[in-house]
Every structure is written in C-alpha cells, then in structure tokens.
Image (tube, helix red, strand yellow):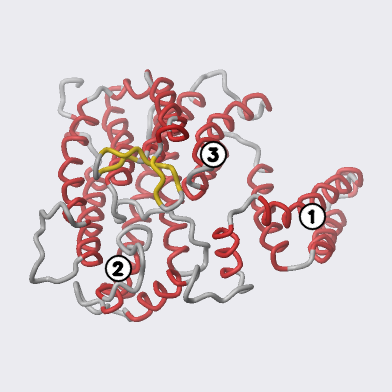
Amino acid sequence: MKNQSVTNYLDWMSVIIYIIMVVMGWLNIYSSSLSTVEDSVVFDLSTYYGKQLMYIVLTVPLIFIILAVDGKFYEKFSSIIFGIALLSLAGLFVFGKTVKGQANWYSFGSFGIQPAEFAKAATALALAKYLSDVQVNLKDVNRQIQALGIVFLPVALIAPHDPGSALIYSMFVLVLYREGLPPWYLWTGFVAVILFMFSLIFEPWAVILMALGVIVFVYLKTRLVDRNIIASAIVLVLVSGFVFSVDYVFDNVFKQHHRDRFNILLGKEVDMKGIGYNTNQSEIAIGSGGWFGKGFLEGTQTKGGFVPEQHTDYIFTTVGEEWGFLGSMVVIALFLGLIFRIIYLAERQKTKFSRVYGYCVAAILFMHFFVNIAMVVGIFPTIGVPLPFFSYGGSGLWGFTILLFIFLKMDANKVNEW
C-alpha cells in the first residue's frame, strides 16, 4: 500500500478547483494590469501578469515537492517549522523592507518575500501538533492559554507591520472551538466586536444602557435557580470598562488611515477622493458589470486604472466588471466549494493532527475570502487582505498552495494509517 503513488489517492476535486481558481486569477491579473492588448507579451517579467505567470510556473515543482515528502514529516517537524516561521517574522523588525508604510517584506532585488503568508501554514501545523497530543483537553484553562498562545505569538510579530494579516489568525478560534474550546470565547469575541462598532457610532452611556437592557433581559429569562446577580453585575462593569476604552484605543492605538477607513465605513466621513476612493471606485466597477459583465479585457473602469491596487487586494473588482454578477457567483461558488470540500475531508481523517490541520486550512481560506470580498464591496474597512489564488503576488500564491497541498498530502496518506 505504501508503494502506491500519492496521485492515486489525491483528492482531485480539490486540485481541479485549485487549478481553475489559479487560472482565473491570472486572467484577471492580466486584464487588470494590461495597458494595451497590441503590445502585450505574456512572459514579460516587467509586468505584473508576467511575474505572476512565473510564480505559477514555479508553483508546479513546489507542489511536487510537498507531495513527495512523507506526510508524517509535517507532524514530526511541525515545531521546528513553526520556530523558523517565528524567526522569519521577528527578522522583519531588523531586515524588513518598508513598502507603503509596512515593513513586512524581505527584499531580494526586484522580488520580495512576505513571511507572514508562510507563517499561516506553520501556525496551523503547530496548533494541530499541540491539539493532537492525547493529554490536551481544552476544557482545562492552562491548555486553553497554551493553545491560544500558539496563535498569539505570530499575531504579536505580524500586527505591528500588517494588522490585516494578523486579523486572519482570529479564525483559529473556530478550530479550537471545534476541538472543545468553551463557546463563551466565541460569544465574548462576537460581543466585543459589536460593542466596539456601537461605541464608534453612539455615545458611551447609550451603549452601556443598551448593554444593561440586554443583561436584564437575559437575567429575567434565566431560570430562578440559575440567576446570579453578582455575575451579571461583573459583566456590566466589564462591558462599561470596554466601552469607555474604545475611544482611547481608536484615537491613540489605531493609525490615522485605519481611523479614516472605519469612519467612512460607518458613514461618519465621506471622502470619495481620498481614503474612500478605492472602495468607491471598486463599487462603481462591480456595479457596472451588470449580470453578465462587459467581457474579458473590456472593463472600462479596469482599463482606465480607476481602482488602485486592482491586481492585488482589489482583484475582485475585475471579476465583477468583466465577468458580471454571474461570474462573481462562480468565483464565490468555487471558494465555498473548496472550503466545504476541505471540511468534508477533514472529518474523514484518521488522525487528529490531520483533522485539526484541515480545519485550519478551511478557516484561513474562508477568512481571506470573506474579508477580501466584504472589503471590496464596502461592507468592511480596507485592511489589505488578498484574495487567495487570485490576487497578485508570489508569496501569497505559494503560501496558500503550501497550506492547501500539505493537507491534500495528509489526506492522500490516510490510506496508510489504518
């Protein structure tokens, strides 16, 4: 059985979806960065589409290497891989190249490497290794702290350079929840987000009164024997402290461009020529695509260069304008299909390590997919999160490819784990 080729057991449905998305991504990068059709040269490395094609070609041997390595390697050396990833992130504070105000790149001539894109797979491996320990029970507070600490370490190193990438790691909490983390963690995070947004819209005392109303309602609806007025009072105090801290954090911790993006999202500022320009133009481009789109290479907003960074974080605007609503739904269906396929495969794994890692892969892809599209259509602030397999960049493409194909290798290897 062990001598069988890994391709015999590779999940080809996931591979085909991956190939379709990479090809569609390159076509949209080609369209968004092409100046004139007549002068285009596909392998021109001075262009974004030329470089992306080179990255795609280099992805092929990368996939073969991942599949050639024994699946147990990733579990056995997960801690070392994680340690190397942390060192690469820490090195940015000294050797990182600053691009658009963020020192999150290592520069090698005209090319750069963004270690945060590779750290996601490393963190997923480390978390899977920790949770697969037979002694780990996430009902234990110490184990909860240790598991969350694995996630926090890369976040602490990434957040100063790239808050958007750091946000992606919040989805690991869902993986921990799947493995037994108490649900109050999820509820606390959800409530904190709601309180934060409400505190930016309303006066603090108004938010506290709303919170008090909810707490009283829950208290009255709780069975008489389970009521705890002291616990309810403590919750109200914590909520009040959080609400009053929002303004300070917003004014002193957030950078100006972050504050501007939140203010525009909440309708407190209208700056269509400044910080809100990207989102406004992307909405115009997507809306102008209609049901069926304007056609490949026919997008007027795209060709006019109205949407900055359209080949990277705003690549979905090209999809919306040239492929229309139906094309956009196809892209969304591909992402959802891949994510649900990974979850399905994760549940079929014979080892906890493989299952946890599979859920990490699904969580990371979903967060990127959701935040990027929400950002582009204006229901989420612009935070610089790429669309997997679509956005321009070698680090992103290779990082997501490594993340996915390590899991597909584990899945193909499960026939030897009986």
For marks 1 and 3 on the same chain, the one whose residue lies earlier in the sequence:
3
Q: Amino acid at mark 3?
A: Arg
Quadrant showing the N terminus: top left
* Helix, strand or loop under label 1: helix
The circle on residue 244 is 1
Q: Position of residue 366 (x, y in %)?
A: 43, 51
- Side of 182 where 330 appears, left or right: left
Q: Quadrant of the C terminus?
A: top left
Residue 178's disc is 3
The crowd level at tag 1 (other Cα within 10 Å; few <14, some 14-19, many 20+) is some
Give, as a three-letter code, the residue at label 1.
Phe
At a point 44% along the width and 40% down the height, the residue shown is 359
Q: Secondary structure at mark 2?
A: helix
Discs 2/3, front: 2
Residue type marked 2: Val
Residue 316 appears in the figure: yes
Tell me which corner region of the image, top left, top right, bottom left or bottom right, holds residue 89: top left
Residue at image mark 2: 319
Inspect this view and state whether residue 347 appears. no
Side of 66 relative to 159 (left or right): left
Q: Residues within 10 Å of mark 3 (few under 14, many from 20)?
A: few
- State how many labels appear: 3
In the picture, measured across the screen, residue 143 lies left or right of residue 402, that is right
Label 3 secondary element: helix
